[in-house]
Image: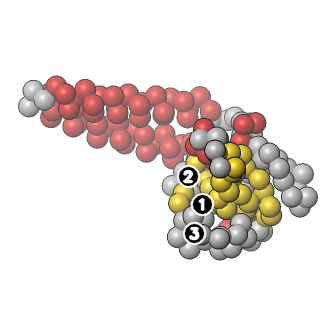
Amino acid sequence: MATNVSQQDETLHKVIEWCEQREVEGLRLANALLQKHDLAAYAVVKAQIDAYHKTAEHCRSMLGYSGSMPSCLNYEDIDDSSPDLQPQVGDYGVAVLENAHGQEEIPFHVEREEHTGLPVALLNIRLYAKPEDDIDDGQYVSLFQLYLDGFMLSRTGRKRNKDAEA
């Protein structure tokens, strides 16, 4: 996906700021829990604080990096509209999962998540849905989660509009 470094850095800074805010809120809550001697709840909150801190640190390490998506997120099969193998906003297709009865095919669109700016899949879980159908009420899922769940992505087309270019 062609995204310049300054756009990526802007998104990373937003994620870092969000994580730091959650970390500060968590520290306040952890302090209150310690004062109440609720050590079990304190341990849970402390783990969340550590996760926010590690996420912010990881984002800081990626600042200025212009690499592409991991190759595991490439399309297995594509239409001929573009030679690019990586999912881009505006793409639509089918997420395919092999199962005991053959395969499950779920139509999807790739959209930009409003808070992080990252591309995500919007799954069309209606019966008899087609990949090119507009999705009014779907399920959002990260592209990486689809990969982890064993889905292969097949692009069947790409919509180009002002929202996809943003």
Of residues 31 and 128, which is closer to you in this image?
A: 128
> Relative to 100, does residue 67 appear above or below in the rendering?
above
Q: Mark 1 points at which residue?
A: 123
Q: Is residue 139 visible?
A: yes
Q: Are marks 2 and 1 in contact (CB under 8 Å)?
A: yes
Q: Is residue 85 left or right of residue 3?
A: right
Q: Can residue 97 be seen in this view?
A: no
Of residues 10 and 31, which is closer to you in this image?
A: 31
Question: Quick one: label 1, few (<14), some, or many (20+) residues within 10 Å?
Answer: many
What amino acid type should be assigned to the residue bearing mark 2?
Val
Helix, strand or loop at label 1? It is strand
Residue 126's disc is 3
The alpha-carbon separation of the residues under discs 1 and 3 comes to 9 Å
The alpha-carbon separation of the residues under discs 2 and 1 comes to 7 Å
Of residues 50 and 91, which is closer to you in this image?
A: 91
Q: Tell me which numbered mark, 2 or 1, is placed earlier along the sequence.
A: 1
What amino acid type should be assigned to the residue bearing mark 3?
Arg
Q: Residue at x 91, y 58 (%)?
A: 80
Q: How many numbered marks does the figure carry? A: 3
Which mark's residue is nearer the viewer, 2 or 3? 3
Q: Are marks 2 and 3 in contact (CB under 8 Å)?
A: no
Helix, strand or loop at label 2? It is strand
Q: Mark 2 points at which residue?
A: 141
Q: Residue at x 49, y 40 (%)?
A: 16
Q: Is residue 11 left or right of residue 159?
A: left
Q: Where is residue 93 in the image (x, y as percent from the top left)?
A: 74, 60
What amino acid type should be assigned to the residue bearing mark 1?
Leu
Of residues 62 and 152, which is closer to you in this image?
A: 152
